[in-house]
Image: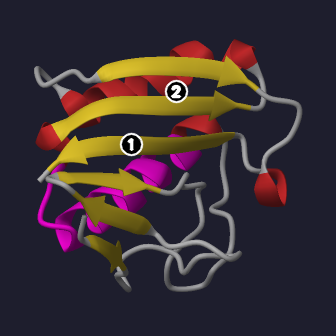
Amino acid sequence: MQREAIRTEGAPKAIGPYEQAIRVNGFVFTAGQIALDPKTGNLVEGGIGEQTRRVMENLRAVLEAAGASLESVVKTTVFLQNMSDFAAMNEVYAEYFGNSKPARATVAVAELPRGALVEIEVCAAV
């Protein structure tokens, strides 16, 4: 098994002992992305819509660095600080996946890093 760490300046640097993504056996597994601006390292301003958009852009950058794309995503996990944000998150999320909808789990959590409202991780074919 050949395991390769994926790193890109197009997404925030890891804020702990992990990689932005790992590519192995024809798949890429991303770390959870929160709405950090890759240039400043700060959480983007705004609500769930703005945060979801930044998360999706971060994921797009990581996937592209791994030789994948949002169209090749097969599974996502969405973590929401508040399930009442589901509809607004889902609206932005749907813009990014269009007709290539992956399988998905969505869970509410008590808290996310840096006070984020949403975190998303994906698995994609390479």
What secondary structure do most residues of the magenta stretch adopt? helix
Please tell me which residue is depicted at 43% across the width and 47% down the height of the picture. Answer: 53
Report the disc number at residue 46. Answer: none
Give the residue pinned by disc 1. 122
Please tell me which residue is depicted at 60% across the width and 85% down the height of the picture. Answer: 40
Image location (x, y in percent) of residue 111: 86, 40
Image location (x, y in percent) of residue 114: 81, 60
Residue type at numbered disc 1: Val
**Foreground residue among 116 and 30:** 30
**Foreground residue among 53 and 122:** 122
Please tell me which residue is depicted at 33% across the width and 30% down the height of the picture. Answer: 75
Whether residue 7 is in magenta: the answer is no
Task: Check the image and name the residue furthest to the front.
Answer: 1
Disc 1 or disc 2, which is closer to the eye?
Answer: 1
- What kind of element bears circle 1? strand
State the scheme by which the image is colored.
secondary structure
Whether residue 56 is in magenta: the answer is yes
**Foreground residue among 24 and 45:** 24
Please tell me which residue is depicted at 67% across the width and 58% down the height of the picture. Answer: 45
- Numbered range of the magenta stretch: 50-69
Q: CA distance from mark 1 to mark 2?
A: 16 Å
The image quadrant where one finds the N terminus is: bottom left
Q: Is residue 57 left or right of residue 24?
A: right
Q: Is residue 74 left or right of residue 20?
A: left
- What kind of element bears circle 2? helix
Report the disc number at residue 89. Answer: 2
Q: Are marks 1 and 2 in contact (CB under 8 Å)?
A: no
**Foreground residue among 86 and 71:** 71
Image location (x, y in percent) of residue 99: 11, 20
Disc 1 or 2, which lies upstream in sequence? 2
For label 1, the crowd category at 10 Å Cα-Cα, with few meaning under 14, some 14 to 19 and many 20 or more, is many
